[in-house]
Amino acid sequence: MLADDPSADAGDVACKALCDIIRDVPEISVDDFLDYYMPEAPVDLDKLVDKLAERSRVRVNSKPFTFTAPLSLDLQGSAHWTAYRKPPVKRAQRRGSTEMTIFADLENIAAQVVKCCLELNGNLKQTNVLQSNGSKSLASQIYTSAKPDGIRILLDPQTNGKLKAFWDNAAVTEEYKVAEGDALDNYQKLVWNLFQSLRTDARRRFVMGLTITNTTVRLWHMNRELLVVSKPFDMNKSYRTFADVYARLSFATLEQLGYDHTIEKLHLNLPKDVRYRIWIEENSYITTDILANYAAQDPFGRCTRVFQAYKEDDPRKSAHFAIKDGWLERDRELEYDTYKDIMEEIELHDWTKYSPPPNDIKDYLAQDWTTRPTIDPRHGTGVDRRKFFIPIQAASRVHTEDGRIDDTVAVMADDHIIPASNGYLPIVPAMSDDPKKRTHTSQQSGTRGNEKKRAEPRHKRGCFERKIGARVHHRTVMKLGEPLNKIESIADAYATLQDATYGLFILHQLGYRHRDVSPYNILRHAGLGVLADFEYTKHVSSRSRHSMRTGTPNFMAVEVMKGDFLHSRDQQGGEVAVWTEGESDDRTSSAAAWEYDYAHDLESIYWISLWLVFRHTAQPRFLRQSYNRQAHENTYTKLFPGVIDASAQREPYLTKEVDLSNAIDVLPQAWITALRKPFRIARYNLMEYYQRPDVRQPLKPTMWWLMGHVLCGAGQQLGGDLVPFSFPQRAALLEKETSNAEQSYLSCPSRPDPAVDIDASGSELSDEEDPSRIAAASTKRGRSKMDEFPLSDGDEHERPVVKKRRGAL
């Protein structure tokens, strides 16, 4: 329940923003929910009901009803719980009755159920206790003003006493409302509770909850792929079901309650503490910090967390590892396997067959390089090519206690699949008060095609209006590195980017496409720029085909955003090919289907290079009076809108020389002088390739040298540090803590993940890209407290929610 305090309004905004993302929740029968999403019944239900109707086992002097049997079955055939002989809506009419006191009587029902179960089976082990929470806030790593009405607090496994009432110790939450008219508010608050538990507690695989509106109950389950709700049932009329639910929850194991047995919180009574013991196969690691938490701002998808950690058996406790923990699609390979394949192929590849690079740009312009073998930008330097990739130490798919691979469908739902014909429960109002924001579909007739689309208000899709798949829990250990977006020196930033471009050269020569190049998966490690995050990386021979286009919106190639060629190709081979099509098995004459290309990785380098100089300005000593800072900031927002459907807005800066030149003109003069020509050269070569008449035509032999040596090399000639612009705070799924407690996390928008998947229709899916990138080491200079915890800025489309410390994303 959100109280009337200053933080409640922010919490209500965040809660409604979350529900607006979800909109409609798949609704299944109560029987299916019990069969597939609940722990098994601990005792025979008939015997449990008989005992509940016998006598009271938990008496409270101040509550007379507790001196009689908690369940009444003989009142003219109308069964009910004794505490709710008068339903809550009628009890509320009494003077002095409050929602909290009315539903606090559920504590006694839960306690009676526990006592009866233990009489039936003395070997049962209770794991949690239901308690009324009222208007108390629960402490957690990520602040929320939400105050759940009821919480099932875990019992200490050593003492069997209740742990403190923190979010991490709240195994199940319940929300109560007296009036049926408040059901929607009840649903929204419960959904927020589920989200809060998942995002703030690194141990949670899934969460469960209940809503009770008067006597109407719904059961809820949320995991990283799905939110599902049961159809309603009446707690009095369906007393057997209600007793069954409370029995199942009271004796559920920690794993059945959604906890991960391979992550142990070391200090259960320190809610903000980030120290965990994490097991990866046979090795255990102790975490010292959370470097990034995508789960803080996205309820579904990969929801990656990255921890800084040391190996537990390391006597020096050197915290130079990053542990990446997230949920990938079931058929995704381990990132470690891709990394090992790349390392092996680097060793086997013949690197002598490539040509040496031009001496400089003049040498490049003076000769014809198109007929030569591909240019190796570091030909003959003896460089160790394995060092251009972040070292990955180990990885595994997380297993449950019974040895199964943890899976959102096979394990959490016992292979239950939501049918396509399934109904949905709306958790947002059917229509906004503002006509411009109405999300219903109009019922107009007499229009067709595009005319009808224009006539109707656009329907806003809920996040489950898509195919619901299965996700598997992955965990990866790698070395730490400093992300490119945290490097302050402009020369160092471009040097790091140049190294990463060479990493792409290596990948491409081995037949791999990275498929998500961004400042967050380019790291500086051991003095070199390195590529990270190989979960989207695919070999050209890969048979694994995903119907999605991947990438980070601000750095995604325009063709990838569009899902189509920039340059129209109706037919390869001209009129003859048109006339003879279908007369042979040779299909190469037909227009080729669009697919991800090596050039798309290199175009991301182009956008990152632009981002470095448009997301930042120069230090004052490098600026002249004629420089217009506001024009610089405004151009950044045009170049980098941060949304996946902005290809039309970004496209001119790639396709049109004049648009790029006009944009560059707003930069500080020293930057214009150094970078104008390199940017134009990079743009020209990308467009020359995109306009090729034959899609089978390979990249120019010099493309990697041009992007790395010419473009990134020019940036290395600049002096000083990059000074980031500050942008207004955005609407958030994260609230700003109003107490004096330290605010560790930034606010963020409803769709902040740095990379997204887009289905064939161009609709965004809740499947974010993960950052090994975010594993960050400390850098040379500290920051003020204001720098450590700034307000959100315009990059929130790109960045994870993070603890803002120097060198950590």
Image: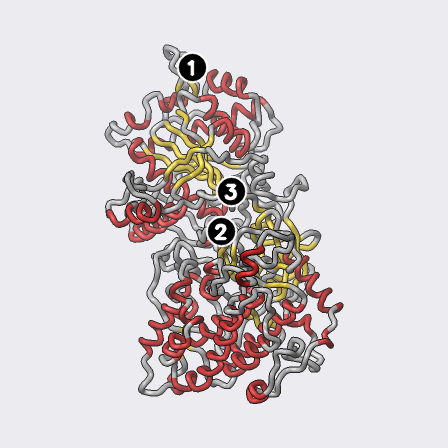
Q: Residue 73 carries which label?
A: 1
What percent of the width, then of the height, locates residue 621? 39, 87
Q: Which mark is residue 759?
A: 2
**Residue shown at 25% from the left, 28% from the top:** 93
The residue type indicated by label 2 comes to Asp
Residue 788 visible somewhere in the drawing: yes
The answer to which of marks 2 and 1 sits earlier in the sequence is: 1
The residue type indicated by label 3 comes to Ile
Give 597 or 565, whichever is nearer the viewer. 565
* Residue under pointer 3: 468
The residue type indicated by label 1 comes to Leu
Q: In which quarter of the image is the N terminus?
A: top left
Comparing labels 2 and 1, the label whose residue is closer to the camera: 2
Left or right, residue 616 beside residue 351: left
347 lies above or below 733: below
The answer to which of marks 2 and 3 sits earlier in the sequence is: 3
Tell me the CA gap for discs 2 and 3. Answer: 13 Å
